Image (cartoon, rainbow, N blue to C red):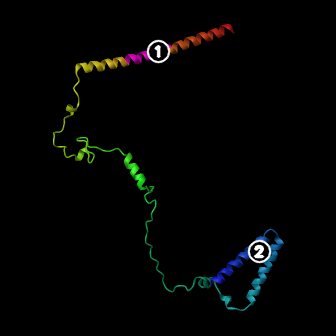
Amino acid sequence: MEQTSLKMTEIWFDFRQLVNKARVQPDRLDYVHKIVKELNVDLDNQSGDFADFTNKDQMAAMLGQQPVGEVTILVPKVCKNKGNYFKKRLVNEREKVLNKSNKRIRKCKKCGAVTYGSRTCPKKYEEPPKKKGDTKQMLTTLDIVQRRNKILHRRKERLKQILLIDLVVSLKHYYFSSFKSFLCHYN
């Protein structure tokens, strides 16, 4: 059967080559067509069992015996292959260690331990919770005066910068206008 299939493939290949060679010139195409018709008539005149050979019979000859009866095909089992199942890149062990070392270490805000956070701290309820006012520092009058002086000093510095900028802009405008009048006067 394989030899017949190979022979048919060779015949088709030779026939395509023949048609490609004759494609450019119409008289050659007519000659090829005439030869093919003669071959067809010669094969029809020869007696043999291939006269009633249909396409179905050719397929059966190539593939083997056709199954008789109903054919049931089951759904194949789905296999999850390795790869990009979650649309993420696979990370090797070295990269995992590097990423872990770059993370910030979380500590308990109550006692400073690294193994747990402040929500699960065992010392959480040993001392009473602090009130909101206890955490803030009481300001003395001296601190208030020092803060006010700093704010006033910043305001003075900012005002000096604004005045300096205004002075530069006005001088630039004055000199530019006087230079312009000077040019107009001598032209």
Comes first in the chain, label 1 or label 2: 2
Location of residue 184 in the rendering, given as x and y in whole percent from the top left corner: 65, 10
Residue bounds of the magenta highlight:
155-167
Which SS type dominates the magenta stretch?
helix
Residue drawn at x 70%, y 91% as measured from the top left: 48
Q: Quadrant of residue 81?
A: bottom left
Residue 166 falls within the magenta-colored stretch: yes
Q: Is residue 89 left or right of residue 29?
A: left
Q: Quadrant of the C terminus?
A: top right
Q: Quadrant of residue 150?
A: top left
Location of residue 161 in the rendering, given as x and y in whole percent from the top left corner: 44, 17
Residue drawn at x 66%, y 83% as measured from the top left: 4
SS for callout 1: helix
Viewer-side label of 1, 2:
1
Identify residue for label 1.
Answer: 164
Q: Is residue 76 left or right of residue 141?
A: right
Identify residue for label 2.
Answer: 18
